[in-house]
Amino acid sequence: MTKHVVIVGNGIAGSEAAREARRVDPNARITVLSEESDRPFSRPGLMYAACGQMAPADLFPFGDAPATRAALTGVDVANRRVLRLDGDPIAYDALVLACGSRPRRPAWSGIDLAGIGHFVSWQDLVWFEAEVHGHGIADAPIPGASDSPYRARPARQGHRPSHPVVIGGGLVGIEAVEVLVAAGLKPTFLLRDDAFWPIALSTRESEVVVERLRHDGVDVHTRVHVEGFAGDGRVEQVRTDGGDIACDFAVVAVGVEPHTRWLADSGLNFAHGGIVVDATMSAAPGVWAAGDAAALPSPSGHRPWPLWYAARDTGRVAGVCAAGGLARWERGVPTNAARLADMDYLTAGEMDGDATWFDEERGPVHSTLRIALRNGRIVGFTSLGRRWHVAAMAHMIQEGWTLGRVLDALPTAAFDTEFVTPYRPTSNAGMRP
Ligand SMILES: Cc1cc2nc3c(=O)[nH]c(=O)nc-3n(C[C@H](O)[C@H](O)[C@H](O)COP(=O)(O)OP(=O)(O)OC[C@H]3O[C@@H](n4cnc5c(N)ncnc54)[C@H](O)[C@@H]3O)c2cc1C
């Protein structure tokens, strides 16, 4: 009998799951459902499109068969059916939930005023482009639940903000700031902590990023607690513990959470909002979960791991298993790459060793390099301002190389273009307390 594999979500996790399911069972009937978009697109590419460095159409590089646009409202696990807002339930033999993340939305007063939004979904990009550049991208919205992150939002056309504000000092917040800078604006950037992104960066790395932002005209405020927004229909002020800040456009970027509220009555288990899965991505009989929506096994319990490569790899495992094959996910060396204030950022491994080696170069290239060691062996690597081959870094960490061996091998791991002066440790490089 032909097996019906239903996949919710056509982000990287859902798309990879569909591809693997097709490979494992070429005869399966595969249905991909997505509220956001009928074709998979690159979510990390949102910033590049909004900066004008890529055309929005280039965010859709995959030629996969289109997904069916549908807003889903629940899963009936006992009867193996997915429920939707409009239309009959969809029966499945195997279900993969790859329903991603949604932006956190604090219960601040005035958060529903016009001119306030997020920077996570395709619909956010459509809104952002219209608000910031005064012209929109063509879009075909579908009706979603009233709190859906994929709901089309009205945007002010033909106007550019004069007091843009970004709230939240993480990866998405700094990307929104960069887009505003690229649009020739001078945003205010409100950070709750003493420094930018202290969970990932050292004090010096954070200072380097903030120096660069200020150089670009960004008004960075640290230790600010936002209390709400005020305005007459449209946002005019951000209310903070230090007073009101003028604002006619605000991006709230205070993190993401698994987009799983619509599954509250499904009987599935959740941890930190994510669907609890084992190493085969199994969540319940006939149900697998993957990507940002899953709470993955880790040494400290089940947790979401909302990063692109984790979503890709867990999506592949879920697709194989849902189609009847065998696969297991292994955590491996965690890695992340991004751009912070126009500087390349790469991290690999864990930065909590028992010793730290650090270097900062301030020549033709301004860069920092931090290597975490445990018992004399590399366990983590963080770099700003240069490009390194992430697989080479992960390999050194996996094999537990000594500091000397890592430094000798760095030239072979460089990923900068040929016109960039090669990295050499400076005279200030060395161990730090
Ligand atoms: C601006 C930005 C920049 C980023 N940059 C990086 C980066 O540099 N490096 C990195 O590692 N990670 C980055 N990330 C994170 C990365 O994009 C995510 O980890 C990854 O895209 C998650 O993929 P996913 O397939 O799990 O979910 P998603 O891509 O979120 O896809 C989920 C899909 O599920 C569908 N869906 C959900 N609920 C429903 C429903 N009820 N009904 C119908 N359909 C539904 C939606 O249509 C959606 O398309 C970034 C994220 C953002 C927002």
Image (cartoon, helix red, strand yellow):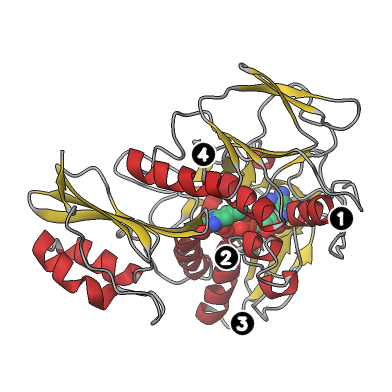
Label 1 vs 2, first from the N-terminus = 2
53 vs 133: above or below: below
Label 1 vs 3, first from the N-terminus = 3
Disc 3 C-beta below 8 A from ligand 1? no
Q: Which tag is nearer the camera, tag 4 or tag 1?
A: 1
Q: Is residue 418 left or right of residue 156?
A: left
Query: Alpha-carbon neighbours of circle 4 within 10 Å: few (<14), some, or many (≥20)?
Result: some
Q: Which residue is mark 4?
A: 269
Q: Which residue is mark 3?
A: 27
Q: Which tag is nearer the camera, tag 1 or tag 3?
A: 1
Label 2 vs 3, first from the N-terminus = 2
Q: Which tag is nearer the camera, tag 2 or tag 4?
A: 2
Tell me the quarter of the image containing the N terminus: bottom right
Query: Residue 157 bears which disc, if any?
Result: none
Disc 2 C-beta below 8 A from ligand 1? yes
Q: Which tag is nearer the camera, tag 2 or tag 3?
A: 2
- Residue 78 in picture, x, y percent from top left: 63, 47
394 vs 177: above or below: below
Q: CA distance from mark 1 to mark 3?
A: 48 Å
169 vs 363: above or below: above
Residue at coordinates 18% horizontally, 54% vertically from top-left? 429
Compare residues 262 and 399 and report the one nearer the observer: 399
Label 3 vs 4, first from the N-terminus = 3
**Secondary structure category for the residue under label 2:** helix
The answer to whether mark 2 and mark 4 are in CB contact below 8 A is no
Compare residues 245 and 119 and report the one nearer the observer: 245
Q: Which tag is nearer the camera, tag 1 or tag 2?
A: 1
Q: Which residue is mark 1?
A: 134
Q: CA distance from mark 2 to mark 4?
A: 23 Å
Q: Which residue is mark 2?
A: 12
Label 2 vs 4, first from the N-terminus = 2
